[in-house]
Image (cartoon, rainbow, N blue to C red):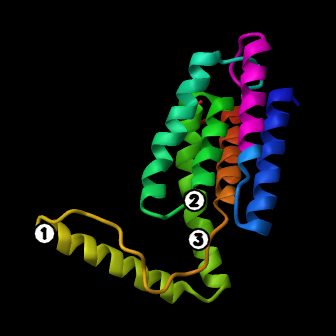
Amino acid sequence: MDIGLAALMCALAVAVVTDIRQARVPNLLVVLGTVAAVLYHGISVYGGGVLHVLSGSIGLISLLEGMMVGFVCLLPLYALRAMGAGDVKLMMMVGAFLGPLQTLGVVMLTFVAGGVLAIVMALWQRSFRQVALNLRFMLTTYAVRAAGGGALEVAPLQQTAARMPYAVAIAAGTLLQLALVRSGGWALS
């Protein structure tokens, strides 16, 4: 296993464990992971990135572009209070390892994994009814405000379902991206 891939997987494993246990992704972990990505891409021979069989540096510009893709794609969910800032920063760290195109693939797969995780958690915690009511309330509120020409703002819900450890979905999306890139059957590689 390539050292860059090992560093990414270790950082994601720690993020998953701390998010499940403490309901947060530590800033220090994100900073150390990002520094590891910068060092890896700064000293490695040029290659296809950490997920490719022929791994190697993607360059520092692609590293920054990957961070921006992770930030831009997850920031709206943070603004809607659908995820925490630690999750956005974790995706930026993943983007630092992967570059823009593969980060976009991870984001798409993370959204799928997050949806599956949300349904499983709602069923497990018997809160699926509350999730459905919250979704209906949010969509109805947005539709009424949009029809009236009002600003679309997010109001806190009166009753929420349980918090979801989104680092699990980010790790799952990254692992799915790894499998798809290595199999050669994925356009975002």
Q: Are marks 1 and 2 in contact (CB under 8 Å)?
A: no
Counting residues from the start of the chain, the first of labels 3 and 1 encountered is: 3
Counting residues from the start of the chain, the first of labels 3 and 2 encountered is: 2
Left or right placement of residue 128 versus residue 138 in this view? right
Secondary structure under tag 2 reads: loop
Q: Which residues are magenta?
A: 29-51
- 3 vs 1, front mark: 1
Per the model, the C-alpha gap separating discs 1 and 2 is: 29 Å
Residue 187 makes an appearance in the image: no
Q: Position of residue 49 (x, y in %)?
A: 70, 23
Q: Position of residue 132 (x, y in %)?
A: 44, 82
Type of residue at label 1? Ala
Q: Quadrant of residue 165?
A: bottom right
Chief secondary structure of the magenta portion: helix
Left or right placement of residue 73 versus residue 20 in this view? left
Residue named by callout 2: 84
Per the model, the C-alpha gap separating discs 3 and 1 is: 29 Å
Counting residues from the start of the chain, the first of labels 1 and 2 encountered is: 2
- Magenta-colored stretch includes residue 49: yes
Residue named by callout 1: 147
- Magenta-colored stretch includes residue 156: no
At 77% from the left and 45% from the top, the residue drawn is 29
At 80% from the left and 68% from the top, the residue drawn is 21
Type of residue at label 3? Ala
Q: Position of residue 99 (x, y in %)?
A: 60, 27
Left or right placement of residue 151 versus residue 76 in this view? left
Q: Are marks 3 and 1 in contact (CB under 8 Å)?
A: no
Q: Position of residue 72 (x, y in %)?
A: 46, 41
- 10 lies above or below 67: below
- 105 lies above or below 84: above
The disc placed on residue 118 is 3
